[in-house]
Image (cartoon, grey):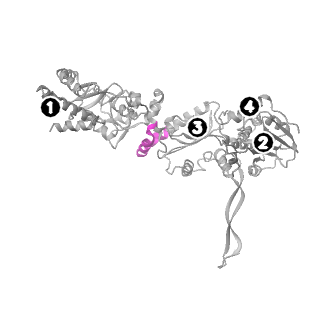
Amino acid sequence: MAKKQFKAESKRLLDLMINSIYTNKEIFLREIISNASDAIDKLCYLSLTDDKVGLEREDYRIRITVDKDERTITVSDNGIGMTQDEAEKNLGVIAKSGSYKFKSEMDSDEAEKDDISIIGQFGVGFYSAFMVSDKVTVITRKYGEEKGVRWESTGADGYTVAECDKYNAGTDVIMHIKEDTDEEIYGSYLEIWKLKMLVKKYSDYVRWPIVMDITHQEQQPTGEEDKDGNPKMQTVNVTAPETVNSMVPIWQRSKAEVTDEQCVEWYKETMRDQTDPAVTLRVNAEGTVSYKAMLFVPGKDIDNGMSGATKRSLKLYCNGVLIMENCDKLLHEYFEFVRGVVDSPDLSLNISREVLQHNRQLKVIGQNLEKKIKGELEKMMKDDRPKYETFWKNFGIHIKCGVCDEYGRYTEFLKDLLIFYTSEESQMTLKEYSDNMPESQKAIYYASADTVKHAMSMPQCEEVRSRGYDILYLDHPIDETVLMQLKMFEGKPFVNVLTEDLGFQTDEEKKAAEEKTTENKELLDFVRESVGDEKLKQVTLSSKLVSSSCCLTSSGPFTLEMEKYFRNGPSEEMRQMRADRVLELNANHRAFAAIRDAYDAGDKDRAADMSKILYAQAELIAGLEVEDATAYAELVCKLF
């Protein structure tokens, strides 16, 4: 039998496919099964108008057979099959797809075609078999033909094709698996458990039964009896055909067929999560892009998003065939905690069927899903606030990062999901805070620290609270950046209680404060010099302090909370970043009076010691470490 040669461009393409197009060898089985499914689709469609086909829908199946001795995997179908001419055209010319031609004919036909969905549109999937096989044999017989065809190839060196006997219509693809190498254990593909796992992973929702011979252990009588007259039992291996795919995925079924409880159980089993999801979202969309989706917001934080360990877990299917295990093109990172599946027949796949040719369809699907996710979260916030606060504790960091991402591109979309503490127990949205503001309040006030309790205890908050105004207490380093990105809400600016002018002083009061600062300029400069010019940028009299003696603030956009955050940064340069520190003193406090008295009396050493003590206390109040705790303790003891 003469060997025929692939065309020159086909040889190059075959080598490219085996070595470059497919990045994951195990998808070969998905491709061969998808081709088998397409062949059955064609014959099933033909049977609608040809009563001689003689097969009912339940008669169609795909069978996988393994022969370890011969090192072969055979995938058989009872679909439409191929003639010799079709075998040469479809298999002898790479990227010549019979499925694509069939689909084009159906698209131009006005006959009913709702049950037809062809995946193999490029004609290259079949050749993925050569990633794991050194020889592939195809035995096929076209429906309506009397003779079969045998096509065989060992790769780019060519192929043979000839007539052969075959009992019925359909196709057998026989893959002779390569010998093992140091880099790859090809023999693992001959294990039943491995093939079953690949079917479950990639082809579980192919619409036709995928059958394999599976061996189970059973207890059977030996034919003998024990001393009590009971039959003796023995463990035997029993091999029987078993359908190893689910066929109809849960998300393809209507709400009448599948309850929410069944969806939750599917989520817990599939995602390996013992906790019920906080949100279950089912979508059946038809339009420019049709798709079905089943999404879940986990009930607990499964991964650590700040460490970068979170993997997006949206599985992307096309007509029940897994295309991407973790699709990062559907949802933005601020919703990366969402789990689930999306299945669309309208995806434009590239030739490897591993990624998408372009993402227009994904963009449409993603935008719609994000609106629905946001709607569900807003509904939870309104109807079950404790549940939403638990969600926020788990995943709020993702929303905050989304607000700051891409220079605030998603700020408007996400801002209504934000909540902030206004006490240790209570949290508010920005809308709720704004609605609760007294008419006299002109700004939204916030204070940032490492905990809510710490933020509430900051002395700068005293005057704001004394006026009956709520404060947003920020307990995460990114919170300040979020509010800086928002700039204002409903026309009301955000004011940092710790660092900014609160705007409470009248012009007369400001003038009096400036005069008092001028009067004490020599003393304030002395305090700064006593602490150290390298530590303090400025010492000033505070307009915010009521009962406290001092506080430490900063000038400029880089705050003390940011400094604390960057101290744990990955680089030495980042860890050395410092805010411009400002020591604010309460001119009406006895501590300031004591420093002034010592300074005026000429006891500058005592005045310097008290200045250093106040600075160290201000550091402690701000949640910073005292540079030299021993020296600080000795200074305190000198006062006794």
Indicate which disc residue 13 carries.
4
Q: Amino acid at mark 1?
A: Ala
Q: Of the numbered discs in the image, which one, if any, rests on residue 327?
A: 3
Q: In the image, is 108 to the left or to the right of 205?
A: right
Q: Which residues are magenta?
A: 374-398
Question: Is 366 drawn above or below residue 144 in the view shown?
Answer: above
Residue 33 in the magenta stretch? The answer is: no
Q: Quadrant of the C terminus?
A: top left
Q: Are marks 1 and 4 in contact (CB under 8 Å)?
A: no
Three-letter amino acid code at disc 3? Cys
**For residue 441, what is the image quadrant?**
top left
Of label 4 and label 3, which has the lower sequence position? 4
Q: How far across and down, in percent of the image, does residue 413 sit?
A: 47, 32
Q: CA distance from mark 4 to mark 2?
A: 17 Å
Mark 3 against mark 2, which lies toward the viewer? 2
Task: Give residue 594's mark.
Answer: 1
